[in-house]
Structure formats: structure tokens, C-alpha cells
Image (cartoon, helix red, strand yellow):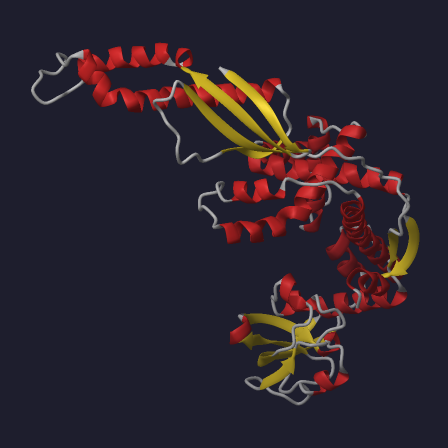
């Protein structure tokens, strides 16, 4: 057998394999001999069919099967021996005039190669690392929400300025149908809030989604609108009022503090505000890190130039998956996934050049911390090590969870690398300013 690579350009090649009779004749002959005792041909007893008739009836199919085995094995070994870094898998070229009776059988496979490129993590950039602070307005608002949430509900006949209103937002055309509880203070425009004043249970109030809230992303919370549809959505929605409640505010006392944060952890209003500030800023730090990672990704994708074997990948996309794609569908899918593929290659390069590796201890430590945080959210602030490690062991026995958590560990390590190398500008902002910077609003 002769096998060679034919370069087309830096990221596209063809593997050409020439298979001769010696490469497969022994296995074909063995298969024919194995077939003879089982062969059935009209006019002959089973097992008594002449060999030439067996070869005539089964030989072509056996030859094709054995040649395919030879080719598949040779292709796999060649890719390994040449240390080819492939995108996708080899695609056989279709030859409508292929002749299985030829002395030499020539097979060609298209391959797409991972591009070679330089990665400069320290390139000059305008990336900002935000330090998000919880200001007095946010903290005071959270204190008021706690008092209201843990206060005593008082049913009301009509809506007043400080009412909690339970009802359902509906727009059938947009698939909106969500029951929620709102306070009039959530609306961006006072005129919208005023529409509800004086309304009773059973009344319907129609509002428009455009500019309904300070942050359009709140449509995701209150109306369950998908993220892709949030920006620019301007449709009328009907809100049917189902319950109206006021509240006798909860007293800020030790009983409430212990209920919220555990016995003795908070002892005064000042402690409560400090705890709210600490928890909020920890959450904001996670959001700021996510934005930083997204901004670095965007910068690296835009500024790291390399070619991809796009035509090959579009053809390859048609062949993978449970459902074969049409050429048009594959083009759409490639356009959707190209940037993700580019960053995947950049990410791999960054990990390789910086010698970033993921160990089981890294994964276990990350999972342990995640489990503790989740347990704390449900009031289990002091779990035993035995309890935590039992949950960790169960989680890490699930391969899908291991993959998901491993991706998060990689992202965390890359984030630390990007913070160090990209040297972003640090800027302290309030949460409202952070939202404006994140979404241009």
C-alpha cells in the first residue's frame, strides 16, 4: 500500500491511498473459505457449492468489506504516525467512476488541519476589569425588601403605591404566559405604575415591554422572555391581577437576623447592611469576572488572525449528527459556531503555552467549594466534611458532571491567566453603572 499527503494550502490536505491486491487478497481468500460450508446456491447441496460459484456470488461484497477494513485501519494509523492535528474527521472523496476490478484501488480523503498561529495575550487592549460596589441605595433597598418579604401579608381591595401584586403577564403571539409577583417600584416609568393604582383583583392592565424596566433583562425574570429576544422587544402584554397584598414590615430584630444568617452572625442593622454589602459584592465579583472573560474572548477572537478550513468544515458538518444537514443548513451551522471554534483553538493554545493542566485535585477542590456554596444558599452554613465529601463523590461519579465542572475549572484558570497577562484597566463602579457598561443601557 502507498499512502501520502497532498497539500492544498496551510489548512487543507488530501490523503491519497493506493491499495493493491497483496493488501487484501489473503483476508478475502480466508473469508471465501469460511463461506463455503455455509453457501447456498440453487442446484447444490449446502456446503457442496463449487468455490468459483461461491466467489462469483459473494466475492465482490467480501472484497469491498475487506478493502474497507484495510483502508480504515491504514488511515487511522497514518493520522497517528503523522501526528496530524485535525479539525473534524477525514472525508472520503466520492468517485462516481470508481472501478473495484482495477489492479490499483485509489482512495482519497479530504482533511482539515488545525491552523498554526501566534497568540499574544499581552497585546495592547482597552479591556476593563470592573470592581462592582454595593452603594447605599442598593443596600437600603435590600433591607426594605427583607422587611417586606418577612413581614405579614395584608390583603387589599385595591392597588396602592406600595402594594405587592400577583398576576399573569400574557401575550399569546410572543409565547408569554408567566405568573409572578411585582411591586410598582420595578417599573421604569411612573406612568406605567400609575396604570395599576386603584385596580382590583380580576382587572387587566396592558403595558408595553419597551422600556418597561430599568434593565431590559428583567423581562427574563418577570415575563420569562428568552435572552435573544430581550433587546428591542416592543409588544403589548396583558397583566391580569390575581391577588393584591400590602405588608406589615418585619421588625429588624435578633430573631429575624438569626433566621436569615444563623445564630449570632448578625446582631444589628449595621451588621445587616455590612452582610448585605459583602454578599452582594461577592456576587457582583462573579458577574464582573464573567464579563472580563467574555471581553477577553472577544478581543482575542478579533485580534488573533488565522484561516480555518471552512469549506471542508461545512462539508463535514453535513455528515455528523443524527440528522444529515443540507449544504444550506451546514453553512448556517458553521456561521453560528465559527467564533466558538476560533476561541476553542485560542483557548487550547493559551493552555499549552502557559502549561495549564487540570488535575483531579483541582476538580475535587472546585467541586467541594461549589457544593459548600450551594448548601449555604439553602441555609446549611456549617456542613461536616463527611457530608460535603459524600456529595462531591456522587457528583464526580457522573461523567457529564465531570465534563461540565472540568470546563468551569478551565475557565477559572484561564480567567486568572488573562487577568495577569492582559493587564486590564481596573475601574470601580456601582451595580447600575456595571449594567450600563455590560449591556450599553
Q: Nearer the viewer, residue 309 or 241?
A: 309
Assign the C terminus to one quadrant of the image. Answer: bottom right
Q: Is residue 364 left or right of residue 418?
A: left
The residue shown at (56%, 51%) is 331
State whether residue 143 is above or below residue 281: below
Asked if residue 358 can be seen in this view, the reply is: yes
Q: Nearer the viewer, residue 362 or 334?
A: 334
* Quadrant of res 305: top right
The residue shown at (83%, 41%) is 418
Farthest residue to the left: give it.
43
Farthest residue to the bottom: give it.
198
State whether residue 156 is above or below residue 151: below
Q: Position of residue 28 (x, y in %)?
A: 33, 14
Q: Position of residue 263 (x, y in %)?
A: 77, 50
Q: Position of residue 154 (x, y in %)?
A: 66, 78
Q: Position of residue 128 (x, y in %)?
A: 88, 52
Q: Is residue 302 left or right of residue 397?
A: right
Q: How many marks?
A: 0
State whether residue 276 is above or below residue 11: below
* Quadrant of res 391: top right
Q: Nearer the viewer, residue 424 or 66?
A: 66
Asked if residue 250 can be seen in this view, the reply is: no
Q: Is residue 362 left or right of residue 419?
A: left
The residue shown at (22%, 20%) is 56
Q: Is residue 274 left or right of residue 88?
A: right
Amino acid at each position: 500500500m502507498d499512502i501520502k499527503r497532498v497539500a492544498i494550502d496551510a489548512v487543507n490536505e488530501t490523503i491519497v491511498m493506493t491499495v493493491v491486491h497483496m493488501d487484501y487478497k489473503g483476508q478475502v481468500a480466508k473469508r471465501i473459505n469460511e463461506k463455503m460450508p455455509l453457501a447456498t446456491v440453487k442446484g447444490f447441496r449446502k456446503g457442496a457449492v463449487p468455490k468459483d460459484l461461491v466467489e462469483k456470488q459473494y466475492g465482490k461484497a467480501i472484497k469491498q468489506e475487506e478493502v474497507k477494513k484495510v483502508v480504515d485501519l491504514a488511515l487511522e494509523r497514518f493520522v497517528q504516525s503523522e501526528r496530524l492535528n485535525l479539525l473534524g474527521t477525514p472525508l472520503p472523496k466520492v468517485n462516481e467512476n470508481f472501478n473495484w476490478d482495477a489492479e490499483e484501488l485509489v482512495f482519497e480523503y479530504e482533511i482539515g488541519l488545525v491552523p498554526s498561529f501566534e497568540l499574544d495575550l499581552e497585546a495592547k487592549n482597552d479591556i476593563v476589569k470592573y470592581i462592582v460596589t454595593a452603594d447605599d441605595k442598593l443596600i437600603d433597598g435590600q433591607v426594605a425588601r427583607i422587611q417586606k418579604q418577612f413581614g405579614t401579608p395584608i390583603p387589599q381591595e385595591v392597588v396602592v403605591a406600595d402594594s405587592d401584586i400577583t398576576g399573569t403577564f400574557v401575550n399569546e403571539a410572543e409565547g408569554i404566559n408567566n405568573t409572578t409577583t411585582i411591586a410598582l417600584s420595578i417599573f421604569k416609568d411612573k406612568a406605567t405604575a400609575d396604570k395599576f393604582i386603584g385596580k382590583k383583583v380580576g382587572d387587566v392592565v396592558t403595558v408595553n415591554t419597551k422600556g418597561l424596566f430599568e434593565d431590559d433583562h428583567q423581562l427574563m425574570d418577570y415575563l420569562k422572555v428568552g435572552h435573544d429576544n430581550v433587546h428591542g422587544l416592543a409588544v403589548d402584554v396583558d397583566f391580569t391581577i390575581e391577588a393584591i397584598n400590602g405588608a406589615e414590615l418585619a421588625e429588624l430584630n435578633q430573631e429575624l437576623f438569626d433566621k436569615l444568617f444563623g445564630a449570632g452572625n448578625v446582631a444589628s442593622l449595621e451588621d445587616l447592611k455590612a452582610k448585605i454589602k459583602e454578599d452582594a459584592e461577592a456576587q457582583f465579583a462573579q458577574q464582573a469576572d464573567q464579563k472580563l472573560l467574555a471581553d477577553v474572548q472577544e478581543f482575542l477572537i478579533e485580534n488573533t488572525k488565522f484561516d480555518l478550513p471552512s469549506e471542508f468544515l461545512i462539508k463535514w458538518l453535513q455528515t455528523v449528527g443524527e440528522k444529515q444537514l443540507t449544504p444550506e443548513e451546514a453553512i448556517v451551522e458553521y456561521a453560528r459556531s465559527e467564533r466558538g471554534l476560533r476561541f476553542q483553538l485560542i483557548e487550547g493554545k493559551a493552555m499549552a503555552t502557559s502549561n495549564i493542566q487540570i488535575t483531579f485535585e483541582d476538580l475535587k477542590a472546585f467541586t467541594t467549594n461549589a457544593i459548600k456554596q450551594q448548601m449555604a444558599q439553602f441555609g446549611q452554613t456549617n456542613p461536616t466534611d463527611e457530608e460535603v465529601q459524600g456529595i462531591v463523590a456522587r457528583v464526580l461519579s457522573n461523567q457529564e458532571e465531570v465534563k461540565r465542572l472540568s470546563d468551569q475549572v478551565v475557565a477559572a484558570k484561564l480567567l486568572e491567566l488573562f487577568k495577569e497577562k492582559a493587564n486590564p484597566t481596573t475601574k470601580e463602579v456601582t451595580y447600575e453603572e456595571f449594567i450600563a457598561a455590560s449591556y450599553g443601557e
